Image (cartoon, helix red, strand yellow):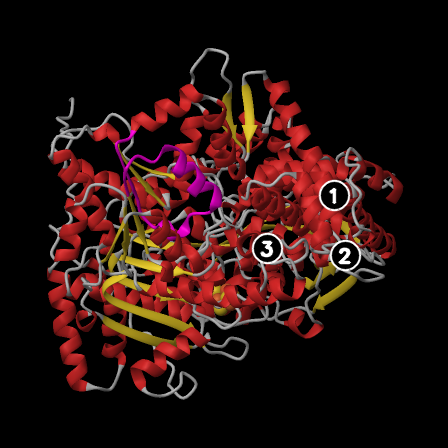
Amino acid sequence: MAANLKLVRRALIVPPLAADTAQEEVVKFRGSLGVFGKAGTGKTSTLVRAALSRMESGQDPNSVLIITYGRESASIIRDQIAIGAKSTATNPLARTFHSLAFSILNEKLSPEDPMYILVSGAEQDAFISEMLESGFDKSQWHVDLALAKSTKGFVREVRDLILRGTELGLTPEDLKRLAHEMNEPYWSGAADFWASYADVMNLRSMSVGETVIRIDPSAIIVEAIYRLKSSPELLKKYRSMFSTILVDEFQESDKSQRELLALIAPEDTVLFVDSSSAVGRFRGADPDSVDRYIREKTKVQIDLDFQHRIQSERIEDAVKLASHAEAAHYIAHELKRAYLHDGLPWSKMAVLVRNPGLQVSALQRAFAQNGIPLNVDAGALALADNPAVRPILDIANFALRPHLLTPGNWERIESVLLSEFCGADALELRQIRVKLAKERIDGSSKTTTEMALELIEDPTISIDSEFRVFARLRDLLAAARKASRGDVSDVLWAIWDSSMDYNGAKISTLWRERALNGGNKGALADRDIDSVIQLFESARRFAERAPGARATTFIDQLFEERILSDAIFSKAQRENVVSLLTVHSAKGLEWDFVALAGVQEGAWPNLKERGSLLGSERLVEAERTGLRSPSEIAASTSYGLIKDERRLFNVARTRAKSRFFVTAVQAEDLQPSRFFDEIFEELYGISADEGDHAKSERSLTSQALISELRRTLESSDEAGKEFATKLLKSLSSEGFSAANPETWLGARALSSDALVVPAEESVYVSPSGLQSFEDCGLKWFLEKNGARDGDSTAQLLGTAIHALARMAAEDSTLTLDGAVEKLTQSWSIVDQNVGWFKDAQLGEARAMLERFFDWHRDNEREILAVEAPFKIEVGRAIVSGSVDRLESDGSALHVVDLKTGASATTKKDALEHKQLAAYQLAIMEGGFTSVSPITKSGGAELLFVGGDRGDAALRIQPTVEREIISAQIESAAEGMGSNEFTATLNKNCRTCAVKLICPLQANGRSVIE
Ligand code: SF4
């Protein structure tokens, strides 16, 4: 049935009408105007009103251009004007300088005009790195840089220097001149490199096709200026295109942006500025002189001094916590409280961070646990750090660079094994190590990590089910390698498409289903799918822009990329979610409630000089100030840096309209920042050091509340218990199923208390089951009813040794060598491993046969039968089975039971061994009269041929008393047919297959209690 869908426009809040005279003046003014105003004075809403006012008075919306600082704020301004305006524009009304310049470059005045393609920062890094490595680079680099040149940090410094130089409108020749004037030892080589880089960029553009030009972000504006200046036709077109230009956040503009503006600015140009919130000085912004610039370049200036965010109504707080995880939970709790108690929508809240990093992961975890929808801005989380994307990149990296599969990289390999793509858990990996340690051949110096890597790497080794996690990784590596002839998208797709869980369901399908099911898990799956889509989008663009480039170059780019530098990628808009973003991305935006996380000393203020080796910041400072003396420039730079950081902090603090709080961690190696101290002291009158750590409270989720109520029920607080009972009852009746005791594990009534075997029926008992039942009734019952693994290699080996032992008894001509040969020939049935693993197993099997043949040769009794079946009745019990060897000494029968396990039963335990005793009773009860008329038992023996020993170990049980054993078997049969099975700790618990659900073990207890 077709769904009836209707498109509805998202509700947006139109900014209020200008409320004070200064704003009114700005809105009405037409002409060259400078507007000063600090955060909270309503600059942006006045700008929007000014644009709307022009449109309302009949001006064509396409003739109004708004230039702003970031893509996000441009999009918000566009939305606000779209809602408020009566007519619509066909061109984007609000844009960034870069977007404007990009459209100037791609303006086609004739069919021959080239098309410009933007090169991302990470791609530039890869390109510079390839040039530095290739030998093509003939630059006269300073000798000091010989070692540094191969590092990624150096590549970034080179890019930064070229970027800043281009933005400042300099040429390589200018840089060479400045190197001399400023006595900068490294700039001369950098200038050589810059010149070659520009040549190669041009060549690359032509090789793609003469109509395509690759351009890096720094060159867009300079290139657009050049194009406007060299094409009178284009300049005329742009000059007449806009009758009004309104520029927001003008304090962030650099020299070239101002030049571009000057070229196309009409008379009606309004510049809005707040020098106290400039954050881009290191990129060329000039907050110190911007106010003067405005006064000089505009005819009229207006101060918006009316503070719209009335400070007294704003609540501020500073909270000190003991760890990043605590801080993340505290923030999640406060936001959830605002949502639940104050009815504040999620979209009106934001969390800001200074830099992407660990705290972002902690926040994501805390928000997921608290059921808070979160949208992490690309800038706050590098794509390669994304938990959904990282394993795919790691697998691709290991597939394409097998030399990285080394013990030194085990931590990374292990994180892949623990991801959903391989599906192991920490316990499983520990157990695998134990197994590998046991399977190590004597004298081998291999570590278990090396053995694990061999299993992962060598495709000729077949992998046991116990090591299935390695098989999954190996399959994914193989799929990636197979696809490596294509481009990077093919490699990543092969991994994604081949990723399955243990049941063979594709991870992609599982995530999709989870996302569609909603809830917390659904939100997480949704986020993960978004990230994977983003990864494929980046890979596709990489392959398009750099045809033929190595897939590893893309992977390296992502690993290195701390802030996603792609300006074109548009992320999906999500409604009603909390935003998590960096302070830089938050500039120009505002929310009702803002939390600023992790204001730590060392991180903020960040006084590390940007580009300290090649000194791009010195270049910017020299051009900005005209200074040439290194010491003066250094002093000016560091003074500017602390001012920048304080301005940035001020930007963060002023993003909140009604509530703002800042968190910092104080722990052994972490101290709150001086900015945090200042706010703390301002609020509480004491230093942050003297203040107490805050504690995060219980999560405001139904699960957390129900858990607390359940804990109260266990306490001795009678009033609390009564209250908890009532509340649980109410919650349960409101549909919270977790509050209903009937759903609690371990609290459900027994589904049946019927006897396993009705009282009047016989109980079938196997001799081996008798021993197992005696050891632990619960284990016996669960294993008998399906709780056991399929045959392992060890079990198959045991079967093979038993078969050969039978042949040796039946065929006296079979020698040890003959038996070993038979075993070797049929080994592939027993064990499908190859390589060292197969050698180890086969060597062990050969040793077992040797021990058996030695014992068999010296055994003087007559063999009457091998694998002789029997069946006897003992009260309710029907005991049946077969004995490995039935032997006679002439007057009595003896049973020998062959064991291939590694450890032997003690001599003392053998005396009480129930399996042997049952065999002896079978002799006495005439169970073997078809083989021999003798019904006298001479005793029974366990023959251990496995393990690490020289000769076979024999454990003897002398003749048992018939009545005693009969009574024991009858009693065991009653127990086996009953309705209660008791767990009994014993020496086999360590290897018990059902201990995860055993109430006597830690893991099992948590299931039951
Ligand atoms: S762990 Fe020990 S006590 Fe528990 S079921 Fe297994 S054998 Fe029995």
Q: Which residues are magenta?
A: 242-269
Where residue 758 sits: x, y (%)? 32, 56
Above or below, comparing residue 505 to residue 72 in the picture: above
Which mark lies nearer to you, 1 or 2? Answer: 1
Label 2 to label 3: alpha-carbon separation: 84 Å
Q: Marks 1 and 2, Cα distance to the nearest angstrom?
A: 42 Å
Q: SS class of the residue under badge 3?
A: helix
Q: Return the residue at label 3.
A: 622
Look at mark 1 in the image and give the residue it sits on: 403
Near-viewer residue (386 or 1001): 386
Residue 980, image x, y percentages: 36, 65
* Residue situated in front as seen by the camera: 348 or 510: 348
Q: Around disc 1, counting alpha carbons within 10 Å, would you say few (fewer than 14), some (14 to 19), or many (20 or more)?
A: few
Mark toward the viewer: 2 or 3? 3
Q: Amino acid at mark 1?
A: His
Of 264 and 1006, nearer the camera is 264
